[in-house]
Image (cartoon, coloured by chain):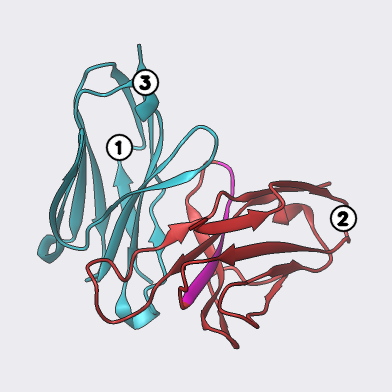
Amino acid sequence: NAGVTQTPKFRILKIGQSMTLQCTQDMNHNYMYWYRQDPGMGLKLIYYSVGAGITDKGEVPNGYNVSRSTTEDFPLRLELAAPSQTSVYFCASRYGGTSGSSYNEQFFGPGTRLTVL
Amino acid sequence: GIQVEQSPPDLILQEGANSTLRCNFSDSVNNLQWFHQNPWGQLINLFYIPSGTKQNGRLSATTVATERYSLLYISSSQTTDSGVYFCAVGIKAAGNKLTFGGGTRVLVKP
């Protein structure tokens, strides 16, 4: 299994541009998450999904949109990029079942480093 | 929401030394994970430990859920242990979304 993969690894955007960060997992996990990490800080939750077609806001959703049309993919859309969205973005997933020793454990992708100038 | 505090914020170790990192949280949790973020930014899962004790090589962790804290032990530290260690917790009522602490930045000197 490749686990959680994210593309691109790096991106520079100009203010006002839009882009989509891609996230794919091949572990058949139900739950998927998007976090952002600002320099020197811990991660904060942007959006999450409990399954295909179901998404919900996290702690810092403003300026972002998500969709979940398949179990595997959970893209994050940035509309009208702003300098405040300069950050490292992490996608994560977990099984979400009701049994197993670590069914709550989240697994993270390698991150996308985004700079908005 | 739940609060997660990690201490110390920074730690400088000589290679071979032992250390203990602490994570305090403000509510009952059903998920607690320790991560190591290496200098390249990758988040590496160390332990899934909502309660009890686990060991993996030179690392071990203990969570005392009733007292709302977890400890991460690093023994015989190596320069490759450098990076930031995060504790993150999740509660069932919040869909097990993870709340991260501020991290402990560890530097191991040769």
* Vertical relation: B58 (above or below) A7: above
Q: Residue at x 52, y 60 (%)?
A: A44
Find numbered disc 2 in the image and state the secondary structure of the residue it sits on: loop
Magenta segment, prevailing SS (helix, strand or loop): strand
Circle number at residue B94: none
The amino acid at mark 1 is: Pro
Colour applied to chain B = cyan
Find numbered disc 3 in the image and state the secondary structure of the residue it sits on: helix
Q: Which residues are magenta?
A: A31-39
Q: Which residue is mark 1?
A: B8
Q: Which chain is red?
A: A
The amino acid at mark 3 is: Thr
Q: Nearer the viewer, residue A81 or A50?
A: A50
Image x and y of residue B98, in percent? 40, 65
Circle number at residue A15: 2
Q: Which residue is mark 3?
A: B79
Pointer 1 or 3: first along the chain: 1
Q: Residue at x 56, y 82 (%)?
A: A56
Quadrant placement of the C terminus of chain B: top left
Report whether mark 1 lies on the same chain as mark 2. no
Alpha-carbon span between mark 3 and mark 2: 40 Å
Q: Is residue B49 magenta?
A: no
